[in-house]
Image (spheres, rainbow, N blue to C red):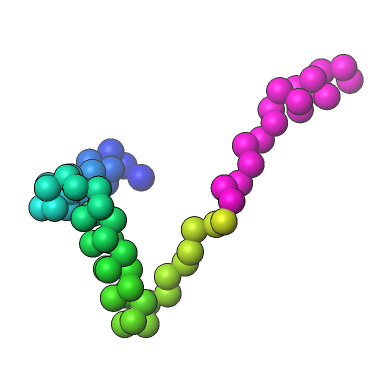
Amino acid sequence: MTDSIIHEVRAIREQHAASLGFDLDRIFADLQARQNKHAAEGWTVIPAPATPPQEPRLTLQRTRFAHR
């Protein structure tokens, strides 16, 4: 992604939050309503994973391979 895309996404997010008065409950409710609307229209909504993926244990890997 380029910086221009990131800036555009952040600007849209800022506008959305401003339109709802930066109220997190209203923002969440609006996003949830949009998601439900899209799902009703037949869009595929992919749920977030139940548990986030584990961070790699780089220190363990470093010590494991350091003695070879």
Magenta highlight on residue 24: no
**Which residue: 70% across, 31% down?**
57
- Name the residue at 25% across, 52% down: 25
Q: Picture quarter containing residue 39? A: bottom left
Is residue 55 a member of the stretch shown in magenta? Answer: yes
Looking at the image, which residue is at 69% across and 27% down? 58
Q: Is residue 12 left or right of residue 31?
A: left
- What span is in magenta? 51-68
Residue 55 sits in quarter? top right
The answer, for residue 15, to whether it is visible in the render is: no
Kindly identify the residue that appears in the image at 13 percent across and 53 percent down. 20
What is the tally of numbered marks visible in this picture? 0
Task: Report x, y in % for residue 37.
Answer: 28, 76
Residue 44, position as x, y percentages in the image? 42, 74
Residue 56 in percent (x, y) is at: 66, 35
Residue 46 on image: x %, y %:
47, 67
Q: Is residue 11 above or below residue 46?
A: above
Left or right: residue 7 compared with residue 32: left
Q: Is residue 28 above or below residue 61?
A: below
Figure quadrant of the C terminus? top right
